[in-house]
Amino acid sequence: MERRQLTHEIASEELPAFALGALDAEDSAGMAEHLAECPFCREDLRQLDDVLGLLGTVVPQEAPSPGLRDRVLARVAAEAGVTRTADRPALRLLPRWAQAVLATAAALVLVLTGAVAMLLYGQWQIRRELDALRAEQGEIASILAQPAWWAPVTAEAGQGQPVVGRLYLQEGDTGVLVIDGLAPLVPGQVYQVWLIRADNTRVSAGVFTVDASQRATLIVTAPGTWTAYQGMGITIEPGPAGSPGPTGPRVAGCSLADWQSGGL
Amino acid sequence: MAREPSDQELMASLQRRDHQALALLYDRHARSVYSLALHILRDRAAAEDVTQEVFLQLWREPQRYLEERGPLGPWLLRVTRNRAIDLLRRSSRERWPARPDARGADLHVPDPSPGPDEHVWSVALATRVHEALGELSDAQRQVIELAYFRGLTQREMADALGLPLGTVKTRVRTALRRLAEILTRDGVWSDVS
Ligand SMILES: [Zn+2]
């Protein structure tokens, strides 16, 4: 759809509402376009933003619990210690466009019967953003086109939200986790993926969050090879780096005994 | 006793990964950040989560602040407000727009006694901002309250208040412009940094 081009006069009138976040999505998008081109409106917005910062002082003042200070500073200290490893994520959250690739693959899934596949397909929308695909497209597409195995990912019994997904694996250490129905997290939390060794110890394979659609599509890289692991679990942990070992509730997972050989 | 470092000096230390700088900034700003989040979310645990997130983000990405000009305190409150409103909208999307409390602005002057470590900037400023709000009409204060603290869009406000959208738009525009004018007129910016 063509969006009307905003004149500077109209943009200037709508800027206070934009600063407050009180415009509808469509109008906000129009404003954002205008702001990209108009230095006067950018300066105007900066001044309105300053006013909105001041407005935040006009509420009853109350101190947070003393424990919060300890928690924040402990997290900072912990992160400072683990920055090196956190900078090397084994798992990346793919951008939205990657779902387009998966939608194509999901069309193949449809030839199989099974509620999981149907559900996944029903919730994917094919997007016209293929021109935005970059390097990871090839990686995901190749894994999904010819996975060596896949395993159904099921919700943990007793958890409220239904979770359905699949973990697609290739020989070696690479896989794609496609998961749907994970509850949105409160700020500061992440989902963390654990690979379970034969001796039941857990190895972190990275962290991710879900968007409002409650979907995530990610590349998972196993330390070593997949053969070293008997399963996978997902827990909720403090973000952004996750925990050294699982501490939060397990929300979903799959077992090595459930691996199915072959492709889609 | 040595002069206390300014926020700007602490931010420079923060960039050099100095934990102590974050601790000092926390002591200075956590109370106003938490209070704003609590006022919006009306839930202590959620407000503490937002507070934690705001300070962890400051630690992880100090350049986000450094790219912008201006004093740190109001900037932190803007970040806090946006996070809290995001959370509020996400958690109450289904119920929204229930009838928000549209009676009038419940804006307060904060308790004038700061905590032991509290920087006085927010207390002094709150009084100035409160006075400026007093120069607005009730109708203008109301739309600012609903948009800023409740996260309502103009359309949602029009529904909640039973007013034409155009009327709400005019009120929002004139209210925020007028507030900016008054604060500039009163030289509030010289008090901030
Ligand atoms: Zn303009």
Image (cartoon, helix red, strand yellow):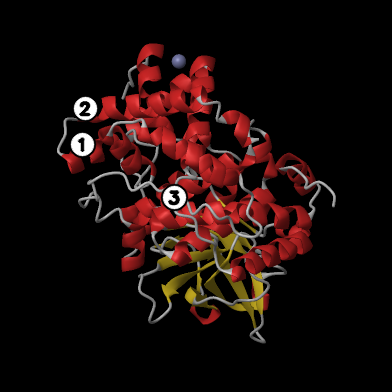
Could you tell me residue B49's position as x and y percent?
52, 61
Residue ID at (21%, 30%): B165
Q: Nearer the viewer, residue A198 or B131?
A: B131
Tell me: is circle 3 under 8 Å from ligand 1. no
On screen, residue B2 above or below A33:
below
What's the distance in space between the residues labelled 2 and 3, CA to CA?
A: 27 Å
Secondary element at tag 3: loop
Q: Determine whether, in the image, residue A107 is placed left or right of residue A260.
A: left
Residue marked by disc 2? B167
Quadrant showing the C terminus of chain A: bottom left
Circles 2 and 3 in contact, beta carbons < 8 Å? no
Quadrant for the N terminus of chain A in the image:
top left
Name the secondary structure under disc 1: helix
Q: Chain of mark 2?
A: B
Q: Amino acid at mark 2?
A: Thr
Residue at horizontal 52 percent and vertical 52 percent from the top: B112
Which amino acid is tagged 3?
Val
Callout 2–callout 1 Cβ contact below 8 Å = yes
Instruction: Name the subunit of mark 3.
Output: A
> Which dot, 2 or 3, sits closer to the camera?
3
Q: Is residue A105 visible?
A: no
Which residue is rendered at x = 56% and y = 45% of the image?
B122
Residue to which mark 1 is pinned: B158
Is there CB contact under 8 Å for labels 1 and 3? no
- Counting from the top left corner in percent of width and height, residue A173 is at 66, 64
Going by the numbered disc 1, the residue's amino acid type is Ala
- Residue A59, numbered label: 3
Q: Nearer the viewer, residue A17 or A238?
A: A17
The residues tagged by marks 1 and 3 sit, at their Cα atoms, a distance apart of 25 Å
Q: Position of residue B99 (x, y in %)?
A: 20, 51
Question: Mark 2: few, some, or many residues within 10 Å (few <14, many ≥20)?
Answer: few
